[in-house]
Each structure stands twice: as structure tokens, then as C-alpha cells.
Image (cartoon, rainbow, N blue to C red):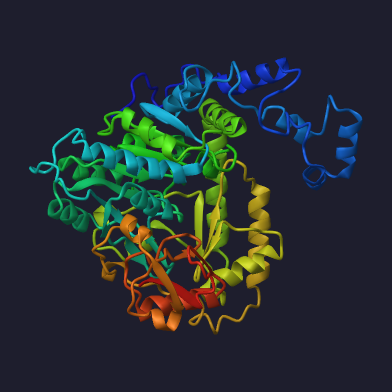
Amino acid sequence: ATPPGCGEDGLDRSGQERTPLVDALVAVAGEVKAPFFVPGHKMGRGLPSRLEDGFMGSTAAAAADADADAGSPLRRLLRFDLTEIPGLDNLADPEDVILDAQRLAAQAFRAKKTWFLVNGSTSGIIAGILACVAQFQRGATKGGSGGSAPSPGVPKVILPRNVHKSAIHGLVTSGARPIWVPPHYNPDFDISHGIDMDQLESALYDHRGEVACVVIVSPTYDGVLANIEEISRFCHEYGVPLVVDEAHGAHLAQFSRLVNDGDPKSNGKLDTATVQGADVVVQSTHKCLSSFTQSAMLHLPYGSLIESSSIDSAIPLVQSSSPSYLLMASLDAARWQYAQVPNLLLQNLRNISIYARDQISEIPGLNVLDSAALASIRTDTTNAPAIDPSRIVVACTRAGFSGFEFAAALERSGIYVEMASSKCITLALSLGNSVRDVELLVAAMRESTSGRASSKHAEMGSTTFPNFSLIHHPKITPREAFMLPSTKVATSDAIGKISAETICPYPPGIPVLLPGEKITQEIIHSLLAFLSEGGKIVGAEDSSLRTLNVFR
């Protein structure tokens, strides 16, 4: 549904010039003369000198000691690191400036209601799944259920295997049983994206009356967007809510208009899930906009099947009861920046992104992911995915590099990428990037690839993870598996046994093994190859994978 009162660009700008939480922090901090409340650094006065010296330099720290009222920039910032004192509202039960700031965010991001998150999108995904499962078990989800009444058994959640590990944590927390739908896979770039519509529809039909929600990732870490409108239509035909992990898409509500209107290299529909039929949308405002790291938002779109009271009940389970006002104020300010001057900032981002893609594409041996590459491995070309041009995936095996090696080569020139994998690197561009950044990047790429022997590119990036469609589906739920006793064995002895750990190659943090799943030779071979190429494993007690925990 379209938000009421919006202009031609879909944005309600009424009141968007205000920053209620930022203004309240400034006003209240100016009134405090003697702080007898937490946090313990007391508005920066007790700041550890080691931190100040490291961040600001010893000269700035000495100047701050000489003039305690002025202080270093870091101390001045920490004057606003306050708590729930009068005038600053309470995130757990907002009634004043936080509520006002959240309402403005809902307008800006085209949602009915918005919650600020200080534990990142991770907390939002877990809360979204909890809310859907709880509402399903109460029999309160609006809409039909494909002709069947809700089942009294264990609720099920349909999701692709390329979900973030926070979705797995949501399964453990909620007790739901996963129904895996294989994502599309591109072997040239070694990325998974989207879900097969036929398999989604089959899963919804086969488990009708038992599904609490569907969870998808759009855009993916690599910037590939799913067709949210079609997915939500399938879901709603069965009365099933759709939760969208849009952690990497906070900029899409406005960026989409600029790209869709003028970028010939963008295929498919580039838009935010809040206006495409999703029921819960979670965005990492810090990833693609300009709020502080760890700050995020959860949006409840217009027409959602999920009640706001269900979200209200779920968020306190995963949100800190001591929220950072600096994080919340940065969300308020990032929303202001996004709503007030979207054309100038986002047009600049679009132009820089196109310039970067064009320049990188001219370097021999480097291939940039585009819609044509994605469509080449799909039979359903009418449902081609869109690609966010600000997220650039570069395959480098033809230049004689694995992704890990190429990232290391760029680091020697001071260029740090968002992610490296066995075959690619991923670049995340945002409002803060400049043409100069791209020039430095391209120069480092040319220098790194110049004269590089490409004869061994066939061996580079050879890691291929198991076919997700062949994953063993355990009879126990992730929550049940989490509670069971386990034992540690040598990895060679673990083959054929049942994993007691979540094993994620990182980045991007997509689980290859979950508790309750069978450990196969194929999986072990892929994980060890990933490690040998420079990747890291998270979730395992022994990150070297010499041992694994299995169920007794």
C-alpha cells in the first residue's frame, strides 16, 4: 500500500526538517551541572586517557585536561552519551521525543510505524520472527491460510539458506522449524540470491496452515534484489506474513527512483520492500546511510498482516534496556539527512557508482556483476532480479587472484573492501564516498593486476559450497538442537554425525551447517578449502575446524 500524504517521489516530507531527539539531547545536556546518573564516564569527564590519546592524540588530550569545560572533541561528544533522564523519553516506552523521531522515520522510509534498534538489524530480524511466530500461535495473523486453519503443531518458517545467521537465531529463540527453499546460485561469482518462485509456492502449499512467516534477504550482501511484489503475493494468498531482511537497502526508498529513471544497466525493479507488500522490513541504517554502527530500524509497512503490538512485545526480548542515545540520535539525524536532501546526495551516489562500475569493467581480468550475468543462469528471465548499483561485486579469478588475495593486494595501497570471497570482492559505496575514492580504488586495481600472471586463474577461487537443495532436513528444531548435550571429535571422525554447531564461512555469514544437520564429506571439503584460501569460519568452537562438536 502507498503511504498517505506522499508527494510524487513517494516521500511525506511534512516535518522532516526537524530532529526532535538530537535537539532534546543538546538541550538537556546543556542543563546538567552535576551528573549523578549512569553512564560512569559522566558526560566524558571520566573518559579513559588511553582511549582519548589513541583517538585524539596526546596533544588534544593534554589540551582537554587544561580546559575541562571545552574538552577534546571526543569528550564533547560524550557529553551527549546520556540516559533516560527527564526530557529524553524512554526507548522501551516512547511517549515524547523518541516517539516523535520514530514517527518521522516512518514517514521518510514509507512505513506505517518504525522502531529504532540499538542492537543492529540482528535484533530486528529476531524480533520480526518472534512476532510472527507468537501471533501465529495465538491465531491472530490477519488473512487466510490457503484454505487451512493454523496447525496446533510446531510453527514453521520458510526461508532460503542464504539468510543471515540472525534468522537462525530467530528460529532458536522462537522454537520454529525451518523449511528451506534453495536460493538461486551463480557459479561464476559464487553468490546465492533470491528464491525460486515455484519452490516457494510449493512450500507454501505443502505446509499450508503451518507457516508463521516467510523470511527473505533483499538486497543480498552482493546487492541483488528479489521480486518482493511477487513473493508477497504468493505469501498473502496463504495468509502468511513476509519478513524482509533489507539490512543493505535503507537507501532504496529514494535511490530507487533515481536509478529506475536513468540507469540503463539496472534491470528489474529497484525499490524498498516497505512499498512492495512486505509485512516486516528491517534496515541497517548505518550500512547504507550515515547513522552510527549498530543502529538500525524495523518498519511495519501499511497493510501489514502483523500487529504493531506483536512487534512491541518482541523487541524488548532482544533490545538493550540501556540504549545508546548517541546511536538513537544518529538515526534521527540520518533520517533528516536522507529526507531533506535526497536528490543531491543520492544523485551523487548514483553517478559515483556508475563511474566506478565503468572504470573497473575496463580493467583486464576483472568482471563486474550485472543483471545480464544473473539472468544467464536463470530460466525465468521475466522475473530478472534488480541490482543495486552502489554495491559492486568484482570477480577477479581471470586476473589470477582469489578474492582474498585481491583484497590483500588492495589493502597494501590503503584500499579496504567490504567483503572478500573465494572468487570475488564486494565494494559498498554510500553517501560518504567520493570520486577521489573511486580514483584511488581503480588505480590500486590497475597496479595490482598489471603484469599479474593469469595462467593459474582456473585454480583460483575453486571453493564451491554444497548444493543447498541437498541439505539434510533434521527432525529436531534449531531450538531443540541448541539444548542438547554434545561432544567434541576430530573433524575426520565427524563425517556422518550430526552437527551441534552453526558453521558459517565469513563473510558473508551464511550457515553451511546448522545444529541437527548431518556432516558430509562434501561440506568438510568445502569448508577446509575456504579456510586454505584465506577465509574465516565463525560459529564453531574451533575456528580452525580441527575438531567439531557433534551430538552424542
Residue closest to the eye, 306 or 385:
306
The picture quadrant where one finds residue 274 is top left
Position of residue 26 measured from the top left corner of the image (x, y, whole percent): 67, 20
Residue depicted at x 40% and y 68%: 486
Q: In the image, 109: left or right of 456? A: left
Q: Is residue 197 above or below residue 26?
A: below
Position of residue 236 measured from the top left corner of the image (x, y, whole percent): 19, 40
Residue depicted at x 42% and y 65%: 501
Position of residue 330 measured from the top left corner of the image (x, y, whole percent): 59, 32
The picture quadrant where one finds residue 520 is bottom left
Q: Is residue 63 above or below residue 266?
A: above
Residue closest to the eye, 293 or 539:
539
Q: In the image, 129: left or right of 411? A: left
Looking at the image, can residue 261 be seen? no
Q: Is residue 175 above or below residue 426?
A: above
Residue depicted at x 52% and y 33%: 321
> As drawn, which residue projects farthest toward the left?
147
Q: In the image, 171: left or right of 58? A: left
Position of residue 159 measured from the top left corner of the image (x, y, whole percent): 30, 54
- Quarter of the image containing the C terminus? bottom left
Looking at the image, can residue 404 be seen? yes
Residue closest to the eye, 225 or 399:
225
- The total of numbered circles placed on residues is 0
- Quarter of the image containing the N terminus? top left
Q: In the image, 450: left or right of 189? A: right
